[in-house]
Amino acid sequence: MNDKIKKSFDLTRQAGILAAKTLDSLNKIIQPGITTDQIDKFCLNYINDHKGYSAPLFYRGYPKSCCTSVNHVVCHGIPSNKTLNEGDILNVDVTVFKDGWHGDTSRMFMIGDCSIKAQRLVKTTYEAMMKGINILKDGIFLGDIGFEIQTHVENNGFSVVRDFCGHGIGKSFHLSPNILHYGEKGKGEKISTGMIFTIEPMINAGKFPTKTLSDGWTAVTKDKTLSAQFEHTVGIKEDGFEIFTLSQENLDQPKYDI
Ligand code: MF3
Ligand code: CO
Ligand code: CO
């Protein structure tokens, strides 16, 4: 790995760890009764207190500092005065900009006791993301990632959202290539050492079509079934990968009772 790649990995790791620590800290405040606006304010303060900027804030007119997607919201839920209730599943997506580089990560949070179906969806989504990550190394194809994710998801009876994808990331928030979470082995662009991108599968309990609400951001499942998502920012190495957005407290996924 050359010096330029090493530097890009070092700076992405710095931004990524701050994003992960922001999510880690949310575990102490997320409980029934909290509003998604309170979560948003907490994220912005945490990031700013640690010398970072929130990349979503004012990005293409986006009004808040994180995305909070509850139950049938697939992604890009806008924090509001909405209160979280026992049994809700929530994705919080934060992207930190620090020293010129980005780290983008999201996790699911379960509010109190959640249905078996909701827990299975969340667990399967996390497993699918990790199956996509664990094969990463120089020389594999983008289609290999999608294949791993889609296979695991469909084996569990759920569906992979087609309308949103992962993305290259670095000095800019969203870069090429698009990382599709479905696909065929050996298809698509070959990946190589030094690439940095996100893997962020959105998985629906029902069918995959989505629609965007009139606020221009909030994407929901068309059939109103639950949706879950996890996201990590990763870097490609000669014989493997690095995850830049790992929890610093082993909180990458919620605790299940299934
Ligand atoms: N963090 C999201 C992603 O994973 C993008 C959010 S853009 C926003 O790519 F404007 F909605 F915040
Ligand atoms: Co992303
Ligand atoms: Co994100």
Image (cartoon, rainbow, N blue to C red):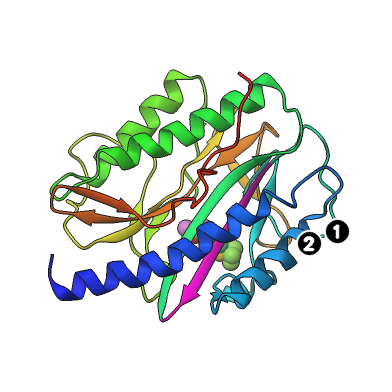
Where's residue 241, x and y in %?
25, 50
Labelled pair 2, 1 in contact (Cβ < 8 Å): yes
Tell me the element at label 1: loop
Identify the residue at image location x=70%, y=34%.
Answer: 224
For the residue marked with disc 2, what is the amino acid? Answer: Asp
Query: Looking at the image, how many numbered discs can be counted on the residues?
Result: 2
Predominant SS of the magenta segment: strand
Q: Nearer the viewer, residue 15 or 190?
A: 15
- Is residue 188 rendered to the left or right of residue 198? left
Q: Earlier in the sequence, mark 2 or mark 1?
A: 2
What residue is disc 1 on? Answer: 81
What residue is disc 2 on? Answer: 37
Residues packed near mark 2 inside 10 Å, few (<14), some (14 to 19) or many (20 plus)? some
Quarter of the rendering occupied by the C terminus: top right
- Mark number displayed over residue 52: none
Where's residue 160, x and y in %?
47, 35
Is residue 207 in sight in this rendering?
no
